[in-house]
Structure formats: structure tokens, C-alpha cells
Amino acid sequence: MASLDILILALLSRQPAHGYELKKRVEAALGGAMGLNNKVLYPTLKRFEAMGAVTSELVTQDALPSRRVFSVTDKGLDALRDMLEDFDSAAARNPGEFQVRFAFFDLLPPGGRMEILQRRLKVVESDLERFNPGFVTNACSRWADSHLGALLELFGKELGCERDWLRAQMDAELDSGWQRRTSAARAGLRSEARRK
């Protein structure tokens, strides 16, 4: 799972940690929505160590067992940036993959952030086109279920909210100096970025 690899490396890039501490940070970053099993965490850390993305050091503690503390390396930071930027159409369809990348946007150059926002926006707008009133009416009549209609209405509203949020993020990227241009040129870039 690319998003888990990103999460582990990104959290280690912020601060070295021992396994249990890293596990708690990952779980906190996921809002408690998902636990991280040791059978997933430690093999991932060993894989990263074998590829040179992380190093580990056994740190002794007074009256407590020693702990292995993991730190990200320069090679690990390069791998992290590559993973963050690897946002193909399959990843763009997955909200979790987008959200993990967005959480660590500060590790990406502005152009890379804008590309990710544009790809996700394209997916959301495509999904919104399918959630037209005719689609909802047809689905409800086919299944004769008013609850389905309510659920489809919710999905459509969520997509609309995400579309608006993505556009606001793109505007913020443009305003923060992604492309320093005149106001007229920025307006042109905004409309071009939204069309993509």
C-alpha cells in the first residue's frame, strides 16, 4: 500500500522514532480510523532499511529495555518524494491515496502539488457528471428504493463539496506564488487549471 509507505517515511522525516512510537503516530495520523499491525509495520521498516531508506540505532534507556530508533536517510527522502509524486489515474481515484499525499504537500514542489490537485479534480468532476438527476432517478426506479436515492444524493453532495475544496486549494497554490504572474495571467491559469 503506497499510502502506508508514504505515511511511515513522511512521519520519520519529521522526527526519528522507535516502532511503537511510530505505530502510534501513524494511527493518530489516520484519526484512529485504522490500527497499524506490527506484522505490517516491522516488515515495512526492515524493507526500508534494506533499501537504505531508513537507518536504525539501538538506544539504551535507564532501567528499561533498549529501543531500536528509526531515522530516514537522504535516499529515503528521495524515495518519499518519488512516492508522493507518483500519482497516476488509479491513485487519483482513491481518496485515501490523495489524502495522504495532501497531508505532506509541504514535501513537494508547488508544480507537483498542482498536478496532484488537477488529477484529483479531474476524477471528482468525472464522477460528478455521472451523478446527474437522471442517473439518480433511473437508479432509484430500477431498485425501487428511496434509501438508495438518499445515498446517491449524499455521494453527489460530497463530490460537489470536494470539487469546490479542490478548486480553493488550487487557487491557494496559485496565490502562494506557484506562478508569479500578473492578476490577469493568474485568472487565465485558474481557468486553465480547472479545465484540466
Image: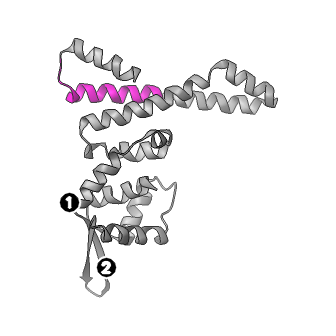
Write the start and end of the magenta stretch as one range: 162-181
- Which residue type carries mark 2? Arg
Q: Is residue 105 magenta?
A: no
Q: Is residue 122 left or right of residue 191?
A: right
Q: Position of residue 66 (x, y in %)?
A: 30, 83
Can you give x and y, in whole percent of width and height, for residue 100 in the image? 40, 47
Other-residue count near label 2 (Cα within 10 Å), few / some / many at <14 / 14–19 / ≥20: some
Our reading of the magenta stretch's main secondary structure is helix
- Which of 64/130 is in front? 130
Determine the residue positioned at 36% across, 45% down. 86
The structure's colour scheme is one colour
Closest to the camera, between mark 2 and mark 1, is 1
Image coords of residue 141 (percent x, y): 79, 25
| Label 2 vs 1, first from the N-terminus | 2
Question: What kind of element bears circle 2?
Answer: strand
Pointer 2 residue: 67
> Which residue is identified by label 1?
74
Label 1: how many Cα within 10 Å (few below 14, some 14–19, many 20+): few
Give the camera-side residue of 59 and 46.
Answer: 46
Residue at 32% across / 85% down in the picture?
64
Question: Which residue occupies the foreground of this view, 71 or 147?
Answer: 71
What residue occupies the far bottom of the structure in this picture? Answer: 63
